[in-house]
Amino acid sequence: MCENCGNGDFMNPTNNDKPLPLFIMIASTAIVIMVLSPFLLHKVGSGGKKYVVGYVDPHPEEKEGAPGFLQNMPKHGYIEGKNVTYIRSENSDPGRIENAVKDMVARRVDLIFAMSPTAAMIAKKHTQGTKIPVLFITYDAVGAGLVKSLIDHESNITGIQQQGSTPKALEWLSVISPGARRIFTFVSFDTVSAGQSLAKLKQSCEQAGFRLTIAEIKTVEDLRLSLPSMPKDTDAVFMLHSWLPGSHVDEIIKETNKRRIPAVSAGHVDYEHGLVMSYAPADDAVGAQAARMAHKILQGTSAGHIPVENADVFLGINLRTAERAGLNIPKNVLSQADYIIR
């Protein structure tokens, strides 16, 4: 039929061959469209859809994870005001959080991002029976009752948990301050995470042979009264995953500098806040994890098919505060640190 087809001259307009019959041209075009249509439709669908995301952050004054989520979403193609709209709730009052979540569900958002166990539990409650997925960042997802296990969980909820580094943080403390055996900590039971992180610290101290003294505080005044009342033999202060002391870390560090002892943590207060050492998740890294998971969900993967992830942890050292505490950080520690402030 076409003598030159094997020579690469199929339908070449410069040839003198007769054109192919019309029915063959139509059939060939149809085959090409059938092959390419899934790719074309995917590109049009993913690029043209506009998303609405519920955003619940009870403590917007903190950098822990939530701002990192917003900052990393554009890396996956979600531009606020262009193809994604955020319905925001930035208030710590549970009643106002609940009303905001109800509104998000009524507006059939594509995803609810919840930055605390309380917010996540409220979102989980009000999305039951809907297809609205929930993505959380919390300290201990299983302990908070959000999921049964990291893999076996509800079909519409998943997220990131930030616990798990306390034992290693105590190991690092033993290296940077070999004589440290008496630890002091402040706790305000203002979040579910506070009680969870205190339980983890108690268990870890008992296993590692540290003696722990706990000061429960309910107000800033309680904190300020507790600072000069710390036992004189305190060797280090451990910062818990507790909002009140974490939001006044400058006052705590001022006292530890005066006593020339280190303040350390395995939580959201880290070396950048002035602690000598932290072995903890990094805010931007947690936000990047959450944005990556949100992208998978928004592109059609069921939240129930995405295991809850543990946040990556990083060793951070603040040499400025270490010097004020009279500590000489060993070189082998510095060589293993992910971040150093000199």
Image (cartoon, rainbow, N blue to C red):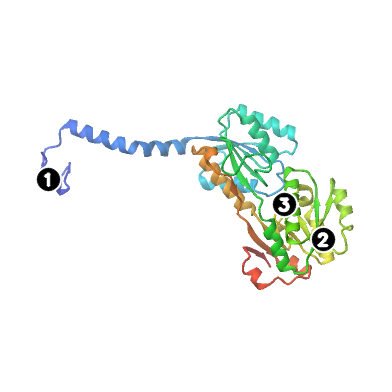
Determine which quarter of the picture holds residue 27.
Answer: top left
Numbered disc in front, either 3 or 1: 3
N-terminal of the pair, mark 1 or mark 2, is: 1
Position of residue 236 relative to residue 106, above or below, is below
Secondary element at tag 1: loop
Determine which quarter of the picture holds residue 110.
Answer: top right
Q: Amino acid at mark 2?
A: Lys
Q: Give the number of the disc on residue 254.
A: 2
N-terminal of the pair, mark 3 or mark 2, is: 3
> Residue visible at 78% across and 69% down?
179
Q: Which residue is mark 1?
A: 4
Q: Is residue 47 left or right of residue 165?
A: left
Q: Amino acid at mark 1?
A: Asn
Q: Which residue is mark 3?
A: 200
Quadrant (top left, top right, bottom left, bottom right) of the C terminus: bottom right
Compute the Cα span from label 3 to label 1.
77 Å
Compute the Cα span from label 3 to label 2.
26 Å
> Residue visible at 89% across and 57% down?
229
Can you see residue 82? no
169 and 259: which is toward the camera: 169
> Residue visible at 64% across and 52% down?
283
Q: Position of residue 38 (x, y in %)?
A: 37, 37
Q: Amino acid at mark 3?
A: Lys
Q: Position of residue 145 (x, y in %)?
A: 67, 39
Compute the Cα span from label 1 to label 2.
86 Å
